[in-house]
Image (tube, grey):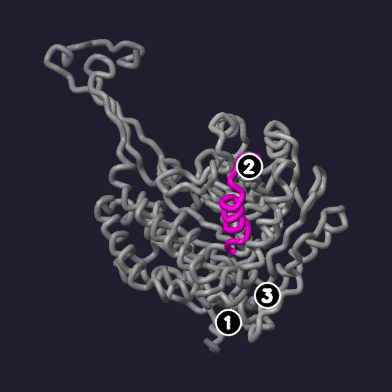
Amino acid sequence: MGEIKTLGYYVNGEWKKSAAEHYTDAFDPSTGKVIAKVPCCTSDEVEEAIASAKKAFPSWAATPVKKRVQILYRVRELLYEHMDELTMSVARENGKAWSEAEGDVLKAIEGTEQAISAPSLMMGESLMDASKGFDTVSYREPLGVFAGIVPFNFPAMIPMGWMTPICIACGNTIVIKAATFTPQTCMRIADIYKEAGLPDGVINIVTCSRNEAEIFLSHPDIKGITFVGSTSVGKHIYSKAAAGGKRVQALCEAKNHALVLEDAPVERTAAGIINASFGCAGERCMALPVVVVQESIADELVAAIVKKAKELKVGPAYDKSTGLGPVINARHRESVVKWIEKGIEEGAELVMDGRNVTVEGFENGFYLGPTILDHVKPGMTVGDREIFGPVLCIKRVRNFEEGLALMNANPFANGSVIFTQNGHYAREFVRHTDGGMVGVNVGIPVPIGMFPFNGHKQSFFGDLHTLGKDGYRFYTERKVVTTRWFDEEEKKAKTVSTWDGTI
């Protein structure tokens, strides 16, 4: 585990050494040690990757969809065969606790299984005699080359579960801009695709800065961009790429809230909150960083959350008993610490402080313990902005109506949750929350992959979400064909109606 790898880029089915002048250190967050040197690929190398994908597109698009998904069946088998290896890769480069890292790989498999449904989900529609003698059929066809711009927090699931499988199952090719801090799992899975029989050039991988990534936004050969990351970058990608006629799905920041009503079972609710708030060290856009609790049970709930949070074992990612692993790097740890300090300055009550946690034998790792800020008031930025760390804010309200209004005032709307045993309030919540993914007594309301990952407001820019039927629509375009065959009488016709079958 002490080897420092110098990584390359992946074009036309082979790994190549980059001519990059600058390499970025990628760390093992559990130890703080450098594990890889990651190239900032040159503009020419990004262009090379796009050209490779463009070259591979015609033959891959002409490959029958059934044959394309047969390769994905083999990919699925290989992902399971290499489960421990890939789990270790995620744990080592990202810092997720072992069970969370394994879940990351399982979600990549889930996306692959969803892509295997392509023969059914790409089917079009037809109608005989849409107009007298006119038959109409619609087809779904691939568009060409897509770009996938990947964040650091899910090295397997996002590039190789959300992006690549459905994209290529639909007959497109892809260039992945892997996350500079966590590229190795994605790269390893690219090798697995090649082993499964994927033709060269269908998948290409680069690592680069925003400067080189700008090429994707205006390149004439890029037909669409799928992005996961910050709202500021997502807005930029959406505005520039969409203005150039490209398809865009930009999945951005969140500040998910849970409303806890006084009839909720406190112990079970606290357990759900712990998992949702501190799982993956809070580094996920579907984390639960804010709990809005009815004042009548607030003290009891906070006490239960603190008790359970103290039971979480903070430790290295590859220790299977770890409940909370490190954050991604020292810079991010510093950012989260500043947010905690900001919350204290704004007047929140620090009821649990994770800033000074240390792990014996791993003193140089990027650890933070669970942190809880109570009495977070409207207007405090700590309760409104994404922190992306193991920090939970408690907001107190008098009743359901006040809680719902407070939640909907937030500019982000990825997910929202209610904990209650009251069917009326649960139904009202589902109907009136702004959240695009809603949980009723479910702390992380991410649906299974046959449904879309469905953020709203400032959490998503685009028209078609990732996964589900939206995913297939995003990666294909519809073609509608109308056919008429002349009978003997019509062959003799000397004139044709202006509307010729359209009325």
**Disc 3: which residue:** 366
Q: Residues within 10 Å of mark 1 (few under 14, many from 20)?
A: many
* Residue 453 visible, this orientation: yes
Main secondary-structure element of the magenta-colored stretch: helix
**Disc 1: which residue:** 35
Q: Residue at left 67%, top 43%?
A: 412
Quadrant location of residue 430? Answer: top right
Q: Amino acid at mark 3?
A: Phe
Cα gap from disc 2 to disc 1, whole angstroms? 36 Å
Quadrant location of residue 325? Answer: bottom right
Residue 113 in percent (x, y) is at: 35, 55
Residue 452 in percent (x, y) is at: 47, 44
Under circle 1, the secondary element is: strand
**Disc 2: which residue:** 413
Q: Amino acid at mark 1?
A: Ile
Residue 252 in percent (x, y) is at: 62, 50
Under circle 2, the secondary element is: strand
Magenta stretch: give its range: 259-280
Q: Amino acid at mark 2?
A: Ala
